[in-house]
């Protein structure tokens, strides 16, 4: 078992002294570390006290020196702060290196935090005879996830308008941040495509084509941009998804494909077959999916492939909350999940598509055209989502040659207009095409 005495491996006395000395002698150096260094990062109690006084003076927006700091420290009788402050400033640190030393302090804090987490679970494991392994693993993941969320973020929190304009002008940031859906009219209403960092909700009545439409989006984007995508399917197996994808790509009835596969008589053009095999689509078919698992899988794919381009979740209401002490209120849980998905989309800078169910109350209305209020256990879904898409078909609509006219309703579009378009849907082939 790891003991607290071993923490000496995970702190740096000299780094803490240098950072404090920099702040005392060069108040402006705080600008280089303000967005990640906090009191808890320091290991030594006396350093925490000095740093807290420095923060207090910085927040007062006044210039300060050692004497001003000591005036606030002199009330602490159990330590000779005057001599210690004199000792610190004699180090004469270079303020340009403060970020380097502050990063070391912060990283050491993260390591100590991980040791504390592991110690806690080792104690729990050794003191209990019957353990709920699933609950234990979820709790470990949650604690590590929270420690990771608090890890250092070197990006500045504030961005100037000038820098944004320069990015637009020099790096074509608009083009790089937009992914074409592969559907002509949908791209028009989305001003070119969906944006990286967007949370996209796709909803509709049962058996309307939600999964097929979402898979078509995944196929189009993955093929065109050659980027890895992950599908979290809590309802359908990987084999069932494969049949849908294959049917759509080779434009062939799903039942015919299944029969041909069983008879080992499926003929596919070599070029198309190689294209299908080269698609970077990864499927997780486990029934229990939460935010922690999605985060972990994304990190794993990034290590293997270098990036993740798109995530599909089928479907939102089947996800479990990652909170250990979650509320019994399912609306609250779904709100927590949708907010976390939006945060993940921003963190990884990728679109996340989540399929959602609709409330049963919709079936009681004469007009079955869905509204945002029809989202099941909606909570804050409508606030968190950047785009909400409803798939709708008139009840009296007759299909022609297995082709159905489907209405794609844009119920919410944070960065553009709402409206509707029409697509052709070949249900037996899981295939959508431009109308």
Image: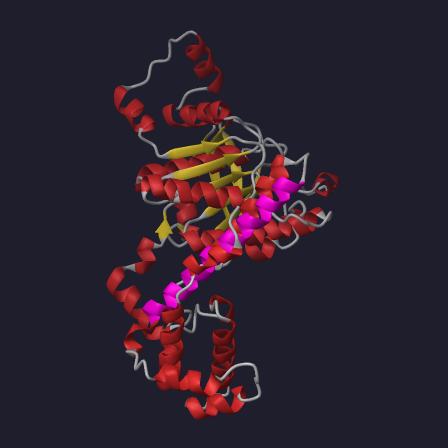
Relative placement, left or right, of 34 versus 331 is left
When asked about the image quadrant of residue 75, the answer is bottom right
Magenta stretch, overall SS:
helix
Residue ranking furthest to the top:
263
Q: Quadrant of the C terminus?
A: top left
What is the basis of the colouring in this image? secondary structure
The tally of labels here is 0
Q: Residue at x 47, y 58 (%)?
A: 7
Q: Is residue 207 above or below residue 258?
A: below
Q: Nearer the viewer, residue 133 or 296?
A: 133
Tell me where residue 5 appears, x and y as whole percent. 50, 57
Examine the image and state in which quarter residue 206 appears.
top right
Extent of the magenta region: 99-127
**Residue 234 in the image, given as x and y percentages of width and height:** 56, 33
Q: Nearer the viewer, residue 262 or 408?
A: 262
The answer to which quarter of the image holds residue 28 is bottom left
Along the line of sight, which residue is nearer the eye, 225 or 311? 311
Tell which of 392 and 320 is nearer to you.
Answer: 320
Asked if residue 49 is among those painted magenta in the image, a careful observer would answer: no
Q: Is residue 186 visible?
A: yes
Q: Residue at x 29, y 73 (%)?
A: 97
| x and y, in percent, of residue 19 in the image | 38, 75
Q: Is residue 108 magenta?
A: yes
| Residue 310 appears anywhere in the view | no
Residue 82, x across and y down, in percent: 46, 88
Q: Residue at x 32, y 18 (%)?
A: 268
């Amino acid at each position: 078992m790891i003991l607290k005495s071993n923490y000496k491996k995970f702190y740096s006395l000299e780094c803490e002294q240098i950072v404090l000395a920099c702040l005392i002698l060069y108040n402006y150096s705080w600008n280089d570390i303000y967005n990640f260094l906090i009191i808890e990062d320091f290991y030594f109690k006396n350093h925490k006290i000095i740093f807290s006084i420095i923060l207090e003076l910085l927040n007062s927006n006044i210039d300060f020196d050692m004497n001003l700091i000591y005036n606030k420290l002199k009330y602490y009788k159990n330590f000779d702060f005057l001599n210690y402050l004199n000792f610190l400033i004699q180090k004469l640190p270079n303020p340009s290196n403060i970020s380097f030393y502050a990063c070391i302090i912060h990283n050491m804090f993260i390591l100590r935090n991980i040791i504390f987490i592991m110690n806690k679970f080792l104690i729990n494991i050794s003191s209990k005879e019957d353990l709920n392994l699933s609950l234990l693993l979820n709790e470990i993941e949650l604690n590590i996830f929270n420690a990771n969320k608090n890890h250092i973020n070197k990006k500045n929190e504030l961005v100037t308008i000038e820098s944004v304009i320069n990015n637009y002008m020099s790096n074509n940031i608009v083009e790089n941040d937009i992914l074409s859906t592969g559907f002509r009219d949908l791209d028009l209403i989305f001003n070119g495509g969906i944006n990286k960092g967007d949370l996209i909700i796709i909803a509709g009545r049962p058996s309307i084509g939600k999964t097929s439409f979402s898979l078509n989006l995944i196929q189009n984007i993955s093929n065109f941009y050659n980027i890895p995508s992950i599908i979290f399917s809590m309802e359908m197996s990987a084999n069932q998804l494969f049949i849908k994808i294959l049917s759509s790509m080779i434009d062939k009835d799903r039942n015919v494909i299944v029969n041909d596969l069983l008879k080992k008589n499926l003929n596919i053009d070599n070029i198309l077959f190689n294209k299908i095999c080269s698609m970077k689509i990864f499927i997780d078919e486990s029934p229990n999916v939460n935010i922690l698992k999605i985060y972990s899988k994304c990190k794993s794919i990034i290590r293997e492939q270098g990036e993740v381009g798109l995530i599909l979740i089928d479907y939102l209401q089947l996800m479990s909350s990652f909170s250990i002490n979650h509320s019994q209120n399912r609306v609250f849980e779904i709100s927590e999940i949708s907010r976390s998905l939006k945060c993940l989309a921003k963190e990884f800078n990728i679109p996340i598509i989540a399929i959602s169910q609709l409330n049963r109350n919709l079936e009681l209305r004469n007009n079955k055209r869905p509204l945002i209020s029809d989202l099941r256990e909606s909570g804050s879904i409508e606030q968190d989502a950047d785009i909400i898409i409803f798939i709708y078909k008139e009840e009296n609509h007759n299909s022609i040659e297995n082709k159905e006219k489907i209405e794609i309703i844009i119920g919410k579009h944070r960065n553009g207009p709402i409206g509707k378009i029409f697509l052709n849907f070949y249900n037996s082939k899981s295939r959508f095409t431009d109308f």
